[in-house]
Amino acid sequence: MHKFNRRQAIGLVGGATAAALAAPAIAQNRKITVGALRFTSHAGTFVAYENSYFTEAGVDVELKFFQAAQPMAVAIASGDVDFGVTAISGGLISLAQKGAVKVIGGALSEEDGIDGQKILASDAAFQAGLTAPSGLDGKTFGMSTAGSSFHYMGSKIAAAEGVSVKFKPLQKVGAIIGALKSGQIDAWSIVPHIAKPLAGSGAVHIIGNVSDYIPNYQVTTVFTSEKNASGEADLVKSFLGAYSNGVADYNSTMIDKAAGEYGVNAMVDLIHKYVYTDREREKAAPGIINGTMRLNEGAALNMASVEDQLSWFQSEGLVDAAITMDTLVNPSFVETL
């Protein structure tokens, strides 16, 4: 098994990587819990953990895994989890209004030229004519819960096409996949490391790209408790510094191919510890590689995209109309776009 980290990358790819290696602030050996989903898009966390960047930053990290975004937001608010990386949801926004959570950075974004999230149709729906998003009128679109990122994406796609869709809440990603494969729902949208293997099986079909409907979409964000954001600046900076080093490793290796095939294989080995763990490495590798999307360097945050998401949640009556961006986001820790 390969072992690959930023120190080895310096020798392989030269000065650019060396310049990017910045020592994060030290948080005095704090024990924290970090929430994650078993998605390739959470690779920044996995790389930082495996390559000891959190330890070097003075934080002793325990990873806690979730099946959907909303439960992670609740765990942050309750104090069971200190930091999370996941999509903005109605639940997260409502918790921010209560002073419980705060978005502090960006994680995954749609980017021109990088293969992104896919719009999927079940085989039954595809055979019946759902071969493009324009055919979604009257169809059933899967989501975890009302107010989830799936709800947001489906609604934006439908609005752009001038069609109406019916949403079906299924709570967990696994349940959505099962419903799509069996034809219980007609359509869904998801990151490519899940979409492409599903399409390859023939049980579902890719009919479009989310980026065509939501350009520069800030798919996931980094968030923490309001208590940490307002009163634990050193801890937040330490976490973000270590996480950002993990992100830089991932982007350099998987997007820029700075360490060639060796680096890609090593990164796949690392990610496979957390993603597609029920599959042999050889079977998991194509899905992990196909799921490569650039993560936000330095946890930079696309404020315009976050504002669009907040406005949509408000327009749907899913969150209070009085909530402002200041309520949801503390932009002081990262670069904003």
Image: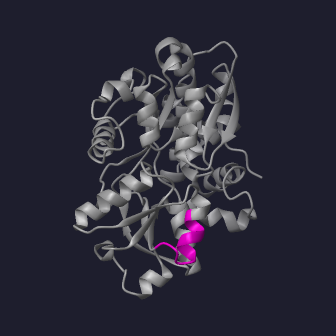
Q: Position of residue 20 (x, y in %)?
A: 49, 31
Q: Is residue 185 above or below residue 24?
A: below
Q: Say if residue 277 shows up in the picture.
A: yes
**Badge count:** 0
Q: Residue at x 66, y 19 (%)?
A: 58
Q: Nearer the viewer, residue 135 or 58?
A: 135
Q: Is residue 241 above or below residue 251?
A: above
Q: Nearer the viewer, residue 82 or 234?
A: 82
Q: Which residues are magenta?
A: 176-185
Q: Say if residue 51 shows up in the picture.
A: no
Q: Is residue 317 above or below residue 98?
A: below
Q: Residue at x 32, y 35 (%)?
A: 320
Q: Quadrant of the C terminus?
A: top left
Q: Main secondary structure of the magenta part?
A: helix
- Residue 322 in magenta stretch: no
| Coloring applied to the structure | one colour
Q: Position of residue 313 (x, y in %)?
A: 33, 44
Q: Quadrant of residue 57?
A: top right
Q: Quadrant of residue 128?
A: bottom left
Q: Is residue 293 above or below residue 74?
A: below
Q: Position of residue 46 (x, y in %)?
A: 64, 41
Q: Residue at x 43, y 82 (%)?
A: 126
Q: Residue at x 68, y 59 (%)?
A: 276
Tell whether 67 sits left or right of 2.
left
Q: Position of residue 121 (x, y in %)?
A: 44, 75
Q: Nearer the viewer, residue 161 or 114?
A: 161
